[in-house]
């Protein structure tokens, strides 16, 4: 639910530029003049798509060596389907939607920009924001958390950024993940002023301490994401490049890497030793059981039940086996073979008082 805003001073966002007649290049140039909604997750280190360093380079107009992102098809599909998803939202929600072809700027924090997909007219006459998203079926889990409806955090902060710039208290997300209108997720979140102030602080720090100061932000993301960022902006290796002398900070990083490498090696060795002992102990127990499927013992008031049950499965590919059984049941019964293995399991339960 939106936070109570009765005692809060409202503001009217400034118009940075009319966008309807802008070319893609012109639009990107204006967008580089501040922090946009899709930049926030990267700045906060929670984006699965871009690092803070990527955004820093973009704001300075430093183009990547590898210009075309790997997910360019998904990005294009998102743009192409935007109007369609908006129509689905309008049909499912019954709410009126409209666009304003303008880029807005926060009057108090001029580095904060907003180019909103759609606006929504609510029954009480107030306005909300609508953000359009597309994804694939495998990514729909990101819209649930512990069985509850949620918004992926990297989209949530985008919506909160737009609410802050526009001084609007509600944002809807409509995400299409299939090819029917029923394969659509609709979520809504309200204003959280404490979260918003922390977000603005991080955005301001990024803009002033890195973009304006021309100081690259440190890499803090996961290793794979960092390496992908480096690849984008450095490109292929240069075998003729001079040897790089590492400074104190990177020398310390190298020492830490070697330490972690050694710790990993020792942990793997210990894990292998544990696995060998585990398998040996398991085999001794199985040998004691012989053909029995169940064994038990008691210790310190706990009853331990050990099972080593046979698990039988057909020796034919599952799909082909089902087809064979349905279409040729006589042949199935005549030729199918069944293999068997046994599953080892231990269960502990408290002893009942005598």
Image (cartoon, rainbow, N blue to C red):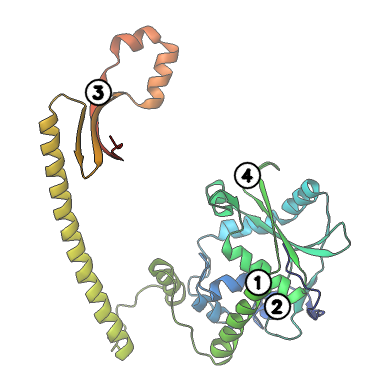
- Label 1 sits on residue: 37
* Left or right of residue 189, residue 270 in this image: left
Q: Residue 282 placed where, x, y %? A: 16, 40
Query: How would you rate the neighbour count of disc 2 (Cα within 10 Å): few for under 14, some for 14-19, many for 20 or more?
Result: many
Q: Secondary structure at mark 4?
A: loop
Labels 3 and 1: the sequence-earlier one: 1
* Left or right of residue 123, residue 34 in this image: left
- Label 3 sits on residue: 339
- Label 4 sits on residue: 178
Q: CA distance from mark 4 to mark 2?
A: 31 Å
Q: CA distance from mark 1 to mark 2?
A: 7 Å
C-beta proximity under 8 Å, tags 1 and 2: yes
C-beta proximity under 8 Å, tags 3 and 2: no
- Label 2 sits on residue: 113
Labels 1 and 2: the sequence-earlier one: 1
The nearer-to-camera label among 3 and 2 is 3
Labels 3 and 4: the sequence-earlier one: 4
């Amino acid at each position: 639910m939106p936070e109570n805003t009765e005692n809060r001073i409202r503001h009217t966002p400034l118009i940075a530029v009319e966008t309807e007649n802008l070319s893609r290049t012109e639009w990107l140039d204006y967008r580089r003049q501040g922090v946009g909604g899709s930049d926030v997750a990267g700045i906060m280190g929670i984006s699965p798509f871009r690092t803070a360093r990527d955004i820093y380079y973009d704001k300075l107009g430093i183009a990547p060596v590898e210009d075309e992102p790997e997910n360019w098809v998904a990005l294009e599909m998102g743009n192409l389907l935007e109007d369609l998803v908006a129509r689905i939202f309008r049909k499912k929600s019954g709410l009126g939607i409209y666009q304003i072809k303008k880029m807005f700027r926060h009057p108090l924090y001029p580095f904060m920009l907003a180019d909103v997909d759609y606006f929504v007219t609510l029954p009480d006459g107030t306005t909300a924001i609508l953000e359009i998203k597309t994804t694939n079926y495998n990514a729909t889990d990101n819209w649930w958390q512990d069985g509850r409806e949620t918004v992926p955090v990297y989209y949530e902060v985008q919506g909160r950024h737009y609410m802050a710039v526009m001084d609007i208290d509600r944002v809807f997300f409509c995400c299409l993940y299939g090819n029917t209108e029923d394969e659509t997720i609709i979520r809504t979140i309200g204003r959280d002023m404490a979260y918003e102030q922390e977000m603005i602080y991080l955005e301001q720090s990024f803009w002033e301490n890195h973009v304006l100061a021309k100081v690259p932000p440190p890499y803090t993301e996961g290793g794979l994401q960092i390496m992908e960022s480096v690849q984008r902006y450095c490109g292929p290796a240069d075998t003729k490049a001079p040897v790089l002398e590492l400074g104190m900070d990177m020398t310390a990083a190298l020492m830490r890497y070697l330490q972690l490498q050694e710790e990993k090696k020792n942990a793997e060795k210990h894990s292998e030793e544990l696995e060998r002992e585990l398998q040996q102990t398991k085999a001794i127990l199985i040998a004691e059981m012989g053909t029995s499927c169940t064994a038990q013992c008691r210790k310190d008031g706990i009853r331990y039940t050990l099972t080593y049950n046979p698990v039988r499965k057909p020796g034919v590919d599952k799909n082909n086996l089902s087809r064979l059984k349905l279409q040729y049941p006589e042949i199935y019964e005549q030729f199918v073979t069944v293999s068997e293995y046994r599953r080892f399991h231990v269960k502990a339960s408290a002893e009942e008082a005598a």
